[in-house]
Amino acid sequence: MTSTAYEHGIHVRPATAADAEAVLLITDAGFGVSSEPENQYEFSVFPLEQALVAVDGERVVGYSAVRPQTITVPEGRSVLAETIANVAVAPTHRRRGILRALYTEQHRRTEAAKRPITAFTASQGGIYGRFGYAPAVVTHDIVVQRAQAEFRADAPDPGGVELTPIPVARQVIPEIYQRWQRVTPGAQQRPGVSWAMLFDDPVHRRGGGTRLFALVHADGYALYRYHRRATGSAVEVVELRAVTPVAYAGLWRALLALELFDRVEASVVPGDPLPYLLTDPRQVYTVAHRDALWLRLMDVPAALTARGYAGDLDLVLAVHDPFRDAGGAFALRVCEGVAECAPTERAADAELGIDVLAGMYLGAHRARAFAAANRLRTGDPALLRALDTAFGSEREAALGWFF
């Protein structure tokens, strides 16, 4: 078995089946969870044989898992990305460069596999900028005061939503998700094991709530559970996906008709239309603003030519990469939504970090906001407006499933 030596006597090598118990101990301690010994899904989404471990002598002190996933990008295109998960370091070995060692080896492998982007969901926000990552999908946690939420007279009232038994929903929902995923930037194709974990709905994953219930429309679905707390009763929307605005309105009409409960709790994209469907938009309270998916561009030309654009461009970007060697000067030309991009020796028209490019990549963050923070620099206001338009997306980015 090959391993790579790093500072402080740490080595990074591929994980083996013999590492399973040590890995579970590190990840449980790192994320504050208790893995169930009988859990059939451990290492099924992110296989152990594809992971890396950091070792101090014979002791496993760090872990990083990986899985290729197809992610939708703007204009209905898709990219095969390397997604990273369950990165953890033993509390006894912090501040020894173990995370950097794991990431160095992982990203070296990703470069060899020629994946244009890497992605993960992050438990902390202040760590990953140094590796060229940025939040590329944003979500808002909302609370709706159900009794006070009334639909406008002109809001769609399509019907067609059915309360569906979970065994039936299990058969029809994946196809609806697939149609939604194909048109939603940031959403990933979902493996069967992820669906099984969701629908099996073990008690320890319910957060004190009931089992799952399902509302199904031909073009959307909502999975939810009930909570009865000392502070009041609530409906928790675990997952809501709608291919069309009409399906979205129908699902929310059904959710807000659950009359025995005080509030409905959900996560939505920042530009969600629910407040515009109600006579009083104040009944939709945003209680948290969170990042949902982080990205890094591993190959700038490959990543930029993989997505579509909302406007034309012709410029040179100077991209700075603090972690790997993906930076440089790149000529980017976009015509009718299709991009060409290649390294160039021409003078730059705009300068930015590779993390800024990642933040703009799915359309969730605007070029003008990064420019206001001096993280994107150009002396040409017209060029900034063109960047802002081109990197936008008709449909807001969303995380497909949490990993």
Image (tube, grey):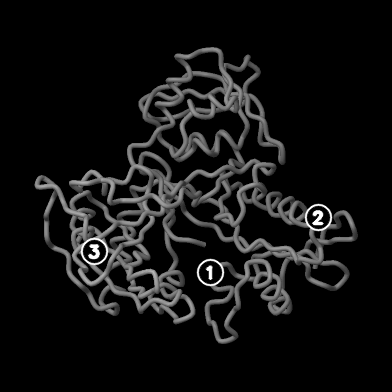
Q: Is residue 215 left or right of residue 85?
A: left
Q: Is residue 327 left or right of residue 238?
A: right
Say which label, 3 or 1, has the lower sequence index: 1
Report which quarter residue 318 is drawn in. Answer: top right
Instruction: Tell me if mark 3 has few (under 14), some (14-19) or many (20+) residues whose alpha carbon lies within 10 angstroms of its own.
Output: some
Q: Is residue 16 left or right of residue 262?
A: right
User: CA–CA distance between discs 3 and 1?
Assistant: 31 Å
Q: Is residue 101 above or below residue 195?
A: above
Task: Look at discs 1 and 2 and give the one toward the viewer.
Answer: 2
Q: Residue at the spot x=32%, y=68% of the render?
A: 235
Q: Amino acid under label 3?
A: Leu
Quick one: 275 or 395, which is closer to the camera? 275
User: CA–CA distance between discs 1 and 2?
Assistant: 29 Å
Instruction: Tell me if mark 1 has few (under 14), some (14-19) or many (20+) residues whose alpha carbon lies within 10 angstroms of its own.
Output: some
Badge 3 vs badge 2, beta-carbon distance below 8 Å: no
Residue 45, which numbered label? Answer: 1
Say which label, 3 or 2, has the lower sequence index: 2
Q: Is residue 22 left or right of residue 215?
A: right
Q: Residue at the spot x=22%, y=49% of the render?
A: 245
* Image position, residue 395 (x, y; %): 33, 41
* Image position, residue 3 (x, y; %): 82, 62
Say which label, 1 or 2, has the lower sequence index: 1
Which residue is tagged 2? 95
Q: Amino acid under label 2?
A: Arg
Residue 255, which numbered label? Answer: 3
Residue 258, which numbered label? Answer: none
Q: Residue furthest bottom?
A: 38
Instruction: Tell me if mark 2 has few (under 14), some (14-19) or many (20+) residues whose alpha carbon lies within 10 angstroms of its own.
Output: few
